[in-house]
Amino acid sequence: MNSDIHRSRNEAVVVNNLHKKFDDLEVLRGVSLQANEGDVLSIIGSSGSGKSTFLRCINLLELPTSGDIRIAGESIAFKQSKQGLIPEDSKQVQRLRTKLGMVFQSFNLWSHKTVIQNVMEVPVHVLKQSKQDALERAEHFLNRVGLWEKRDQYPAFLSGGQQQRAAIARALAIEPRVMLFDEPTSALDPELVGEVLKVIHDLADEGRTMILVTHEMKFARDVSNQVIFLHHGKVEESGTAQQVFYETKSERCKAFVSSIH
Amino acid sequence: MSDLFSNWHLLSFSDDGWGWRMLEGLWSTFQIALGAFLMGLVIGLLGAIGKLHGSRLTRSLLAIYTTLIRAVPELVLILLLYYAGTGAINQVLDMMGYRPIDISGLVAGIVVLGIVQGAYATEVIRGAMRAIPNGQLEAAQAFGMSPVTVLRRITIPAMIPHALPGMANLWLIVAKDTALLAVVGFSELALITRQAAGLTQAYWVFFLAAGALYLSLTLVSNVFFRRLERHARRGQPGLS
């Protein structure tokens, strides 16, 4: 895990000095990160540390109060409003979002569409691919997550693990520059966590760029080449998995990672 | 009650029977009901979108519309909109130098009942849209869908199963509300029934026949809406 190698690659997501306030509550107090192509970056921290909010700021599901966000080298243009920053150009935001494949904690599959319709939806109706192309790719990605035989089922008829794998296929189908995972196994029954982690692990091995918010410490340690430990909205520790899990000088970080080992 | 047993021939489809006229009345009733329902559906869809996403002014105007329409009795609204409405249109035409027009009863009936339906449909559809899990809308946004695409591809199809029971109710209500148009002289089923019964004195026969026709319309609609709902809920286990 030589970080110098990754620094020489193209940047995928860069966030600078991000702040987020909900009314008077300051959830993020100046968080920065850089993920380059091929990086697997995990964000860990206790509940309420702001890690999910931070991830949701990257694709603007939450609007930051201040800070810079750059996706694939392109800065998101903001203007100041009374509530904080708002995007200057919603078309730019929509375009940049298609470079970010988001996987949610609670899957958020579209319940009125079958699995394959879920996977084809964005390629056909946002990326304007032909139905035939989108269908072929969707079948490929469903195969990839082991759900090809479930392609004509509706999400509600699948297990949580299957739904989350379908959601991963949906995110893969837009061929994103970066995959964003927001606690992808937190809503799953314990026996279903493994199948989802295995899929994510395989994606990491393929060299896909990903930013993960997770409570699975062992998993974060094994797949990540960068780990960030957030505490009360600030980066308390960051570095390679080795550094954050075994060489940290932060007592909080030490206590947090040891409680889960 | 003697006519109950002796006067059924009045309903025959021969020249001196009222059969065809009753069926014509039913057809008029159906046309107005369908037109008003569809108009209400369009108003309801736009109204719900306006109430959920509109500016403060839009929301205030819609609140006034739904409150007023739902507060005032439909009969009063029909009289008001029909007489005052046609009067106003003709005044405007007069001011612009056009001749007054004779507004067709069918169009007037559809518009008046459509405005009433629209107020109720706005609330039904607004509730149905609110029932969509927020995560599904968030996912649509996160994948770069524009607001119009989210509406077209996610919100509208996902709200249909939630809206169908309420909309089926509104259809049954509008089918019967058409009878109120008898007061402005539009010849739908109720007015024809009253005329026929008055002329022949066979009240039992004609009002029972009209009741049966309204009932058959309802029963057929129920079958249709049940199928529609089953189709709309195909993605929901245990509900189909």
Image (tube, rainbow, N blue to C red):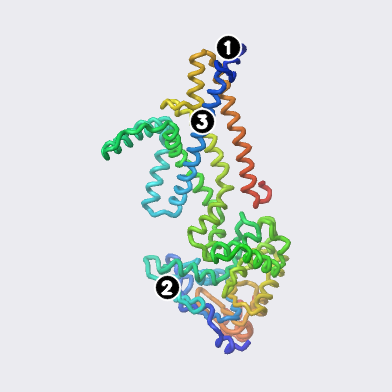
Instruction: Residue B60 in the image: state x and y as whole percent.
Output: 38, 48
Residue designated by label 3: B29
Horizontal and vertical percent position of residue A136: 66, 66
The image shows residue B152 at horizontal and vertical percentages of 52, 55
**Chain of the residue on which disc 1 is drawn:** B
Circle 1 SS class: helix
**B184 lies above or below A259:** above
For numbered disc 2, what is the local secondary structure?
loop
Examine the rendering and report whether any part of residue A44 can be seen.
Answer: no
Q: CA distance from mark 2 to mark 3?
A: 57 Å
According to the picture, the residue beneath numbered tag 1 turns out to be: B3
Q: Which residue is mark 2?
A: A77
Label 3 amino acid? Answer: Thr
Circle 2: residue type:
Ala
- On whether disc 2 and disc 3 are found on a single subunit, the reply is no
Q: Which residue is found at the position 45% from the left and 49% from the top?
A: B46
- Chain under callout 2: A
Instruction: Tell me how far mark 1 sits from mark 2, CA to CA.
Output: 82 Å
Depth order, front residue of B186/A12: B186
Neighbourhood count class around disc 1 (C-alpha, 10 Å): few under 14, some 14–19, many 20 upward:
few
